[in-house]
Amino acid sequence: MTAKTVPVDSFDLVIFGGTGDLALRKLLPGLLRRYADGQIPQDSRIIGVARDRQNGAEYRARIGEALEKITEAEPLLRARLPAFLQLLDYRPLDATREEGWEEFGELLKTTGPDRIRVFYLSTSPNLFVDLCSRLRDAGLNTGNARVVVEKPIGRDSASAAAINDAVGAAFAEHQTFRIDHYLGKETVQNLLALRFANILFEPLWNAGRIDHVQITVAETVGLEKRAGYYDSSGALRDMVQNHLLQLLCMVAMEPPATLQADALRDEKLKVLRSLKPITATEVSHVTVRGQYRAGASGGAAVPGYLDELGRPDSRTETFVAIKAEVANWRWAGAPFYLRTGKRLPERVSEIVVAFRPVPHSIFDASAGPAQPNRLVLRLQPDEGVKLWLMIKDPGPGGLRMKYVPLDMSFAEAFGVHQPEAYERLLMDVVRGNQSLFMRRDEVEAAWAWIDPILEAWEQLPEAPKPYTAGSWGPNAAVALIERDGRTWHEDTGT
Ligand code: NAP
């Protein structure tokens, strides 16, 4: 069974960085899927741009080859590939040079000024300023144009403001789509549905009933091909500032009046502004920085971060754990423990809402302990929602308790293809729906909370704490939560 899809209007989508990793692994496969589902009209155009000199036919052949590999196990998708490739074209352009932009403008203008034009900036962020000013100079920032900005948006408040100013000089805020693909995940939508389409959870959704929340985004990979970028960034900038804080907002925000983009984003902004600042004096107590040493991943020995990087002196953190507090009426007293890192034992992203224990147990000790309820929202690898409950262990004999998950992963149960985050987000951009994209003030509020942590870390004499590749980070991360009488969630299966 496939979910119902509503076709979007015809559009021109320009992928700056159309030969890059993101375009090949996420954007073009996502577009192919939407096309195969009948959501993209045949007269739409997808134009790849990069410096590489090649023509449209060569680009189609190159992309076709890459997509063939991806669609190997999906004959229906493969069958639609030749028609999809007809939508593709290519123009060689250098963001930093004048040549070619006029002809490029002419190519786009053939579909008229009212055409939906999407400019996806899938290049290194240091090209965003050039690209936006060239698009403006070429008169391509028309009313129906939208620009998609990939992360990272800056490395602190000041650099984020500079990027936002440059984008803002060419495109209005309602045309600017700052992407955080975590927001496009099915489970995040499900969190909205669970919270705001049911009466059950909302009365319990506060520090009076919720003990704490955990947000984990764990990767098994090391540096891959991103060494230069990653070493200048680190886990706090690369993951916490955007993905983890956005997830925190979705859990913590007040019910928005509607699902309109600004109603939702106003509520997320309030959460970001309620985050209790972490001062230099407490930074060592409520944050943990780690860096992996040699160990094992997926059964194979892997080198440590410094060896992988080829620099013995880097103090960049590849792991971070933070005890964050949302200082408002709803959440005071229920901390949010955030944890992310590379070379951890599993690739998993999940939100755990840990409820408080029952106030009094009526059961004998022989029934076993009553464990507090937990709502676990898994974003990857297997998207789904589980509500952990106590039930009576079925069968004869005395009354014994059992802790079991109520599995609410309905999409899988109904055999529905769960769209990849980029699929949904790309179609939202074409529709002009900004609900799942970050507004400028959100990005800046997130940096305003992150900046003092970065500054405080800079002042610390000690380097990030070492952890063995394949472990769950430094021991200090376990101590961070256990000091409060809590533990990191472990899925004990069914
Ligand atoms: P990438 O593989 O390095 O690709 C960069 C692309 O930009 C290439 O197509 C490159 O082609 C083109 N390019 C470089 N310099 C150019 C110039 N002067 N003018 C025009 N095009 C130029 O990078 P990526 O991994 O796809 O990442 C793209 C963006 O997405 C980055 O901002 C990254 O932070 C973000 N992002 C990526 C991922 C991911 O999974 N890859 C995830 C999240 C965010 P030529 O060299 O031929 O010009």
Image (spheres, grey):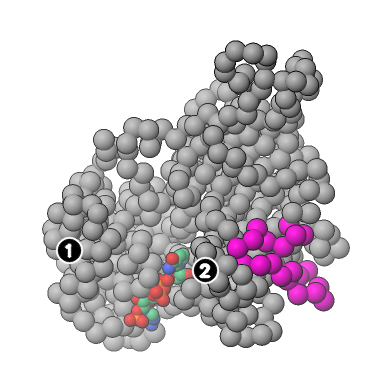
- The answer to whether residue 211 is above or below residue 112 is above
Please tell me in which quarter of the rendered image ligand 1 is found.
Answer: bottom left
Residue 275 position within the rendered picture, expressed as x and y whole percent measured from the top left:
71, 50
Residue type, numbered disc 2: Ala
Residue 486 shows in the view: yes
Q: Quadrant of residue 345?
A: bottom right
Residue 470 position within the rendered picture, expressed as x and y whole percent measured from the top left:
60, 63
In the structure shown, which secondary structural element does the residue marked by tag 1 occupy?
A: helix
Spatial separation of the CA atoms under disc 1 and disc 2: 39 Å
In the structure shown, which secondary structural element does the residue marked by tag 2 occupy?
A: strand
Which contiguous range is marked in magenta?
455-477
Residue type, numbered disc 1: Leu
As drawn, the label of residue 85 is 1
Confirm whether the magenta stretch covers residue 76: no
Q: Quadrant of the C terminus?
A: top right
The residue lying at 80 percent from left, 62 percent from top is 283
Confirm whether the magenta stretch covers residue 466: yes
The residue lying at 57 percent from left, 18 percent from top is 394
As drawn, the label of residue 300 is 2
Disc with the residue nearer the chain's start (1 vs 2):
1
